[in-house]
Amino acid sequence: MIKVDHISKDFVSPKKYPGLSGAVRGLFSNEKVIKRAVDDISFSIKKGEIVGYIGSNGAGKSTTIKMMTGILTPTKGSCEVAGINPSRSRKENAQNIGVVFGQRTQLWWDLPLSESFTILKEIYNVSEEAFRAQMEFLNKVLVLDEFFDRPVRTLSLGQRMRADLGAALLHNPKVLYLDEPTIGLDLVVKDNIRKAIKEINEKYETTVILTTHDIGDIEELCSRIIIIDEGKKIYDGSLQNLKEIYGTKRTVAVEIREPEKAKELCLPEILGVEEGDLTAAYDEESSTLNVTFNKHKIQVPQILSAVMNRVEIKDVQIQETELAQIVKEIYNHGMTEGA
């Protein structure tokens, strides 16, 4: 469905010089600065996949999406969406894609929502029969009827996001690009938007590309993620694989009956591991010993055995590293492309 082959995108701008004299010099200088926003990225996405395309601010996500939608032309490499080169056949490509930007709307601000949909119907040459059928489905999953005749400017953020999603899907596109679709929404509305995206994907096998900073969106919707950093792809694979490879830390919370003895435990020494592979902190308020360890170097039974041989315990809880923490570590330190 989508094939991105070694694409790069450079932006050229005049070189700026400091100070007033630098500003004057800049008027007569021909020197240019080249900024590479996307650097030799390749991937392919199958029909019906929901893929999270994530990275920190300025990583190159939006630039890549703009090349896939045909707004920008790659400096190097090629991009193909549903058999079409987006930048060469923009009009034909537009018939195959839908786009939702969380902070921008494609709807007419002062018109009733119903009028916006009628205009979009004509723009995309949707037949009357197809329009009725699609509106019936969209009303079912997005509940548009409750505000369909109101001006767009009077809609709440949650209502507008549902309306924008419906507008992007009116012509039943093959590919749906979602940029921060749940930004600023409350938990209930977020959940409804996620359910709607799932149902649309299941019914039409719509390929979905999701860019978001909300890890909840990724965990709920995506089985695969692509991570980019400073314009380069650094990970492409499943969520489970990401957690297995890079989520090396686990935490065991052990509730202790004998607080004084718990304070005296030196688990790294008892277990013969380096402190970097295991740390233990005792919380007096909850009488809990929190042991964080590298799951590739030591196992839970070893830790529990060491603790139980020395103190009496009341309860045990095991926590995996959350995806949000893994992604945060990647953003902070980067990693080599793997998996």
Image (spheres, helix red, strand yellow):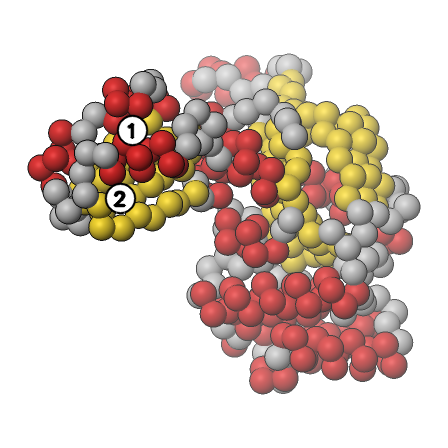
Counting from the top left corner in percent of width and height, residue 48 is at: 77, 55
Q: Which mark is residue 196?
A: none
Tell which circle, 1 or 2, labels the residue nearer the N-terminal end. Answer: 2
Q: Secondary structure at mark 2?
A: strand
Rendered residue at 78%/27% (across/down) = 6
**Residue topped by disc 2:** 254
Quadrant the C terminus occupies? top right
Q: Is residue 132 left or right of residue 296?
A: right
Amino acid type indicated by mark 2: Val
Q: Residue at x 64, y 68 (%)?
A: 196
Q: Residue 237 location in percent, x, y? A: 66, 38
Residue at 54%, 36% in the rendered image: 244
Foreground pick, 40 / 225? 225
Q: How far is the residue under mark 1 from the one under mark 2?
A: 13 Å
Label 1: which residue?
279
Q: Position of residue 322 (x, y in %)?
A: 44, 44
Q: Is residue 146 visible?
A: yes
Q: Amino acid at mark 1?
A: Thr
